[in-house]
């Protein structure tokens, strides 16, 4: 019985901690995006490249872009939905919003703005909380059958 507690409980705690970390990361990025949308300045940039990140059987799509502010060039990358990814073409101009006090931080704006990364963080957190619940459920079952 003690063996099940030793096995399932730490794993459940690890999944809970990972889920909380994902939620905090999602919140921090959402806060930054809100700050840029609220107090950022508009600027035009150019799409440099289409990027595909693959994890297992899943693919995530991103657009890299470049913009110039006060004579200096800045590069950025933003994850977008697949539907949006296929609509954009390398070399096209795109609307961006950046922070004047931190000009290296920018996001796509208007119809170009996507929340694909936020959905991924949320889904990862939900999956990790679900795995934590499975571990707790298995722990409870093992304790029930141990008596």
Image (cartoon, grey):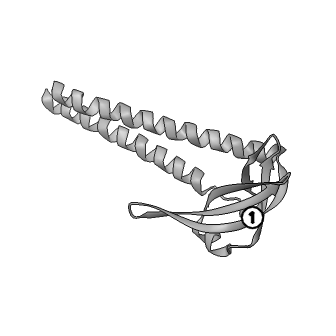
Could you tell me which secondary element the residue under label 1 belongs to? helix
Corner quadrant of residue 31: top right
Q: Nearer the viewer, residue 59 or 23?
A: 59
Residue occupying the far top of the picture: 2
Image coordinates of residue 46 in percent, x first then y, are: 75, 66
Residue lying at 58% horizontally and 43% vertically, measured from the top left: 26
Q: Is residue 138 left or right of residue 43?
A: left
Q: Nearer the viewer, residue 4 or 63?
A: 63
**137 vs 106: above or below:** above
Image coordinates of residue 57 in percent, x first then y, are: 39, 64
Q: Nearer the viewer, residue 47 or 18?
A: 47
Corner quadrant of residue 49: bottom right
Q: Which residue is mark 1?
A: 111
Q: Nearer the viewer, residue 138 or 35?
A: 35
Image coordinates of residue 60 in percent, x first then y, are: 52, 62
Q: Is residue 65 left or right of residue 54?
A: right
Residue lying at 15% horizontally and 33% vertically, measured from the top left: 145
Residue lying at 72% horizontally and 63% vertically, measured from the top left: 112
**72 vs 6: above or below:** below
Image coordinates of residue 142 in percent, x first then y, are: 19, 33
Residue occupying the far front of the picture: 71
Q: Is residue 7 left or right of residue 118?
A: left
The C terminus - image quarter: top left
The N terminus - image quarter: top left
- How many labels sit on residues? 1
Q: Residues within 10 Å of mark 1 (few under 14, many from 20)?
A: few
Residue lying at 62% horizontally and 74% vertically, measured from the top left: 86
């Amino acid at each position: 019985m003690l063996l099940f507690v030793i096995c399932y409980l730490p794993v459940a705690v690890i999944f809970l901690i990972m889920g909380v970390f994902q939620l905090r990361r999602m919140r921090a990025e959402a806060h930054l995006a809100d700050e840029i949308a609220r107090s950022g300045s508009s600027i035009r940039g150019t799409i440099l490249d289409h990027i595909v990140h693959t994890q297992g059987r899943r693919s995530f799509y991103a657009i890299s872009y470049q913009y110039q502010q006060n004579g200096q060039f800045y590069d950025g990358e933003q994850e977008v939905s697949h539907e949006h990814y296929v609509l954009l073409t390398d070399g096209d101009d795109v609307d961006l919003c950046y922070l004047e006090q931190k000009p290296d931080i920018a996001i796509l704006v208007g119809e170009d703005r996507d929340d694909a990364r936020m959905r991924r963080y949320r889904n990862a957190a939900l999956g990790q909380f679900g795995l934590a619940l499975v571990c707790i459920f298995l722990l409870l079952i093992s304790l029930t059958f141990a008596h």
